[in-house]
């Protein structure tokens, strides 16, 4: 009986570790993707609002550091790992699409 209890305990511990590893990957990789997409979209958006290219890039880059920190906190604060991944991936894809639309020589 004790062997099966320790097997269940080890399985539960491994599952917990896998969830933490997934959240860590979402925070590091997904947060980086979200920050990069927000920097690109923000830079192009600020340029369309009239800022010079260097000022727009600097402002968007500084804001992307805040985005990265919030994304990492989001990944560990949400209820499920699926929500952690979706919370980084969906906005990153939306911002990347927005940046693609604003690119000079792009579709718009």
Image: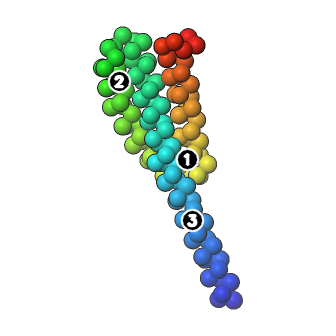
| Foreground pick, 77 / 100 | 100
In percent of width and height, residue 27 lies at: 48, 48
Q: Secondary structure at mark 1?
A: helix
Q: Nearer the viewer, mark 2 or mark 1?
A: 2
Residue 38 image point, x, y percent: 45, 30
**Residue displayed at 56% across by 11% down:** 108
Which of these two is toward me, 75 or 52? 52
Q: Is 89 drawn above or below residue 94 in the view shown?
A: below
Total marks drawn? 3
The answer to whether residue 14 is left or right of residue 75 is right
**Quadrant (top left, top right, bottom left, bottom right) of the N terminus:** bottom right
Q: Residue at x 65, y 77 (%)?
A: 8
Rendered location of residue 76, percent (x, y)? 48, 52
Residue underneath mark 1: 84
Give the secondary structure at mark 2. helix
Q: Earlier in the sequence, mark 3 or mark 2?
A: 3
> Which residue, given by chain and number where applicable, does mark 3 sit on?
16
Distance, label 3 to label 2, CA atoms, is: 40 Å
Q: Residue at x 49, y 38 (%)?
A: 33
From the image, tell me which residue sits under label 2: 57
> Label 1, label 3: how many angstroms apart (C-alpha)?
15 Å
Residue 93, picture quadrant:
top right
């Amino acid at each position: 009986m004790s062997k099966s209890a320790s097997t269940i305990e080890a399985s539960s511990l491994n599952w917990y570790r896998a969830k933490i590893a997934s959240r860590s990957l979402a925070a590091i990789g997904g947060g980086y993707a979200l920050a990069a997409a927000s920097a690109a979209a923000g830079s192009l958006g600020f340029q369309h609002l009239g800022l010079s290219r260097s000022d727009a890039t600097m402002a968007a880059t500084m804001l992307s550091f805040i985005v990265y920190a919030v994304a990492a906190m989001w990944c560990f604060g949400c209820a499920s790992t699926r929500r952690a991944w979706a919370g980084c991936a969906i906005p990153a894809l939306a911002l990347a699409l927005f940046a693609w639309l604003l690119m000079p020589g792009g579709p718009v």
